[in-house]
Amino acid sequence: MEFKKLLEQQSEEAFKKYIPTLSIDCVIFSFHENSLHVLTVRMKDQDSWGLPGGYVKKEENVDDAAVRILKDRTGTENIYLQQFYTFGNLKRSESAFEAYDDSIWNKQRFVSIGYYALAEHSKVKLVIDQYSNAVEWKSIENLPSFMMDHRTIFDKALLTLREQLNNHPIGYNLLPEKFTMPELQKLYEAILSKKLNRGNFYRKILRYDILTKLDESRKGGAHKAPDLYSFDLEKYNAALKEGLKGSW
């Protein structure tokens, strides 16, 4: 079915099913090959890319709606999720539906609640639905053109991620269970978009006493195999309550 016709047919049902004027946009981050990535979606009638999003059912909590949207797009609901901002500028979404009648659901004014999510890259199953023709991870260093105000939403999510690096379990949710110290440093560098001094980073992280050094190392490579670590979750959560001290 032609995409425009599909949306027009579903419009009447959407007015009955969802809360008017309220939407959700999710910025889903992952860490892969030493780069921070964001999940992007391309709608069937759009050239630009967008963030995964959706609407809130009339008999549904807002946070539950965000979990449902994440599950629909990633195949999992076991993802760290944090509400971070509300976006309500005039004519946020109308430009994406210029060819549609003003009465269609998608062309109404929507105030969007932004969530950022942290997902371990290997555990996410990308799902293409009836509204999209592509779902891809994009490195934040090489982002595509975004539809509507989704670049603004992404920028605010990344800024929030940086601000919350010292009091939210960001490393725990983006790294695999076992990781090396260089991998942890690369994660921080990717989020902060700057190089960190190796010695200073190691000393600061070890001083927090939130890591457990494992009796194993990462095999392979030409150099000495680096030691593997895991987060001591109890100590990590306790440290986050106080906030990891100092700037990066």
Image (tube, helix red, strand yellow):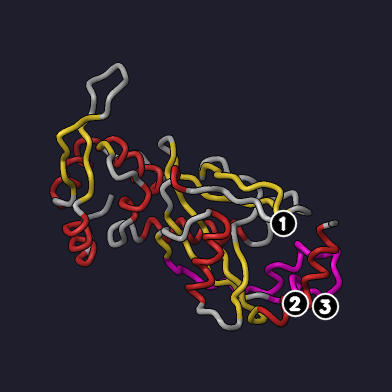
- Relative image position of residue 190 (x, y in whole percent): 40, 43
Q: Nearer the viewer, residue 33 or 79?
A: 79
The residue that mark 3 highlights is 103
Stretch in magenta: 82-109
Which residue is pictured at 53% across the width and 72% down the height?
65
Q: Amino acid at mark 2?
A: Glu
Quick one: label 3, few (<14), some, or many (20+) residues within 10 Å?
A: few
- Please tell me the numbered disc located at residue 130: 1
Reply above or below: 143 against 163.
Answer: above
Quick one: label 2, few (<14), some, or many (20+) residues within 10 Å?
A: few
Reply above or below: 218 against 126.
Answer: above
Q: Nearer the viewer, residue 60 or 93?
A: 60
- Relative image position of residue 225 (x, y in whole percent): 23, 24
The first of marks 3 and 1 along the sequence is: 3
Residue 95 colored in magenta in the image: yes
Q: Amino acid at mark 1?
A: Gln
Instruction: Work out how far the residue at label 3 is from the one at label 1, CA to CA, in angstroms.
Output: 22 Å
Horizontal relation, residue 154 to residue 80: left or right? right
